[in-house]
Image (cartoon, rainbow, N blue to C red):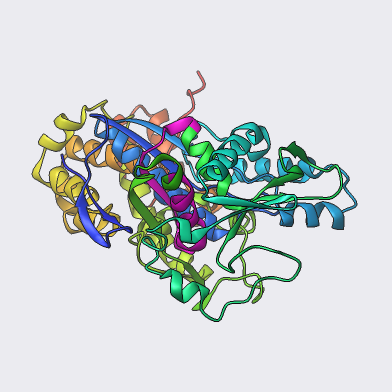
Amino acid sequence: MNIVLTNTLTKKKELFTPLVEKQLTLYVCGITPYDHAHIGHGRCYVQFDFLVRLFRFLGYHVTYARNFTDIDDKILKKAESQNEPDFTKISQLYISSFHNDMQKLNCVNPSVEPLVTTHIKQIITFIEQLITQKNAYIVGHDVYFDITSFADYGKLSGRKIEDLLSGARIEVDTEKKKPGDFALWKGTAQQEFWQSPWGYGRPGWHIECSAMAEKYLGKTIDIHAGGMDLVFPHHENEIAQSESLHHQPFARYWLHNAFVNIDKEKMSKSLGNVVALDKIFEQIDPMILRYFFLQHHYRTPIDFSFDALQGIQTVYKKLVAHFGHLSTPLNYQASELIASHPIIKEMIEALCDDLNSPKMFGILFQHFATIKESLELSRAVRSILQNIMGLTLAPLAEEIVAITPEIESLIAQREQARINKDWALADKLRDQLTQKGYVVNDKKLAK
């Protein structure tokens, strides 16, 4: 089945065609680990986890790279504020926190998670080559990229070099030639960080992704993805670096998810409304948050609130109630599942149309009554929900403890029916409990 994606570069829907048949190379920009991951990170990585799952379901071999920017001004400032002389302890603390959040959101592990600090040699080599080609220049211990050396600069964001240069001011204490030029290497007069041909220092932000993407995915990758906030300057600068050096497309498709607003305001540190994932998980099951993300198209802004999560929880419970108790889904081949029923085919076609998860859920609930009547159809739908959408369909934490008098009565009646070996009644009562969103795990009866 063909997949259509909206390419940020062309602003159009395009039929995805891989560089190598049934193979996909994907690079998603990772976090700068100086604090706990927030809801914007959660949306990004759930969305592109869904993309990875979909391609793998359709038979692609996916090589998925997601980096960590584990050396950065923010990390150094956090280390200083905590009187921690080893900045790597700060980055490792928040990398561990991030991994814990991703596990709770049921995100698959990337094929590779490169750290900037372990790829300095590759980064320095990349910069040296840009200097040789006269795309970059040295100022003291610093190295800058000359944006006028790349004719297509601005093609991703739609910005023009003239606009970037007009009226702009060069930062204090730099001697770069033009205000739009950006740092490839940040030098230091002290013997700090790493030694390079230009003296001691550390990489600029943008160069690291170009170097690591090349190392693990090649000079041209199929899809580069990330949040909309990365289009400019980060992804624009990655294109300039990589395409200047290799003279071929850096990425053939660019995908960007839209922002998350908090109670109708843009989420930002300055507004103090950044919501950390670990704080959300103290109140809401992570699968509710994952389902919340997937209820929205990835290019549509989301307005987050705890009230919204509470509302969507009721809908998710319907899925858990019907599909959660089913045995492990059949190990369908994609072609078999697509051909198994027109409803299934329609659901997967929606996902292949620019990752349209809201449309897929709409089709599911439109035909929910029909799906519930068929065990095989129900199992096929569960396969989509579990294997492509990444929803565990396990009982929610609050469901385990919220036992009402009515539920207690049904449980007691069913236990008595089992003692009486009235299996038909026991099955009927189990079905009633399931419809109310409770999963029964029987223990062996005492003799």
| Residue occupying the point 10% across, 40% down | 341
Q: Position of residue 418 (x, y in %)?
A: 39, 30
Position of 188 compared to 435: left or right?
A: right
Q: Nearer the viewer, residue 134 or 17?
A: 134
Which residue, as the protein is rendered here, is positioned at the far right?
A: 83
Give coordinates of residue 183: x percent, y percent: 63, 55
- Viewer can see residue 298: yes
Q: Is residue 232 magenta?
A: yes
Q: Residue at x 59, y 33 (%)?
A: 122
Locate the N terminus and report the quarter of the image it occupies. top left
Query: Would you say 428 lies left or right of 353 here?
Result: right
Vertically, is 212 above or below 367? above
Question: Residue at 52% across / 22% down in the picture?
Answer: 446
Query: Magenta residues?
Result: 215-242
Say which of 321 and 195 sits in front: 195
Evaluate whether residue 429 shows in this view: no
Quarter holding residue 411: top left
Q: Position of residue 21 (x, y in %)?
A: 23, 29
Magenta span has 427?
no
